[in-house]
Image (cartoon, helix red, strand yellow):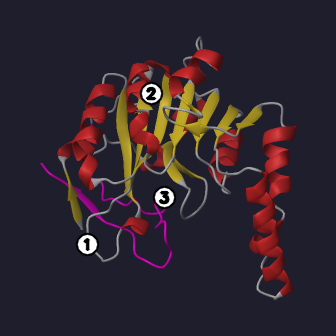
Amino acid sequence: MVKFPKEFKPIFVDNEDLIRLGSIDDGGYVVPIETVKSSDTLISFGISDNWDFEKDFFKKSSANIFAYDYSIDNNFWLLKFKNDLIKFLQLKIFKPKKLYKMFQYVDFLLFFRMNKKNRFFLKKIGKGKNCISLTEIIQNFFNNNKKLFLKVDIEGFEYEILEDIILYKDKFQGIVIEFHNLTKNFNKIIEFINKISSSLHLVHIHANNYSVKEIDKFPEVIELTFSKKTIHTNDKSNDKDYPLKNLDHPNSKRSPDIKISFDI
């Protein structure tokens, strides 16, 4: 078991009011159902070859999906198909899920190109040349919209957009954010939690077990879920055990999930 500072302890939300969206392992996140249903647009930073979260979010909310990822260009898809085809010819691919992965680009087109409610942008999130910031996105598309949900999984670049999130915190119904390089950024994350606390509650925490090499070692990646305070006003003491049974699952199936406690 690993112990987190008290700032990382979520408020109480009944498990029946939570839902897991996305993959059963890495790429899935626990979020409040009402937060999802009350959102009319999901802004998703980082999808790679897994948009199960986005598809589940769309099914539950019918929200518009705006996804950003600079890594999945045409070369990515061509190389992926080539490698999968080689494995198939070598009889290494025979399960339905792996066969789906071979032709995943078709699913990508159907979800992001053919569906008029959804859009994909081949853009890098952050600051500097060839990047686009959260501020630019909101000002370009969502300046008058206050029912956004934000998902952030951009491998360490999340720290470049924290100030933008704080600036526009009142626009978000909810946020899921994956923090990397945890131990050297503790103070930044605590400051972020405190600065958005006037608008958003921390409602869930999960440690990514891909980021540890040994049991009970402190994780370097955590997943935090926030929800608008007007949606969750329960002041009941939270004595739940994390990870949550039947909701949380280990990111890596080969290792046990990480148990979490909190400073008093």
| Amino acid carrying mark 2 in the image | Ile
Quadrant of the image occupied by residue 181: bottom left
Q: Circle 3 is placed at which residue position?
A: 247
Report the span colored magenta: 236-264
Residue 196: % across, % down: 34, 27
Residue 95: % across, % down: 77, 79
Quadrant of the image occupied by residue 235: top left
Q: Circle 1 is placed at which residue position?
A: 216
Main SS, magenta residues: loop
| 237 relative to 263 in the view: left or right | right
- Residue 51 appears in view: yes
| Amino acid carrying mark 3 in the image | Leu
Report if the CB atoms under discs 3 and 2 are less than 8 Å apart.
no
Q: What is the secondary structure assignment of the residue under circle 3?
A: loop
> Looking at the image, is mark 2 or mark 1 earlier in the sequence?
1
Q: What is the secondary structure assignment of the residue under circle 2?
A: loop
| Amino acid carrying mark 1 in the image | Asp
Q: Circle 2 is placed at which residue position?
A: 231
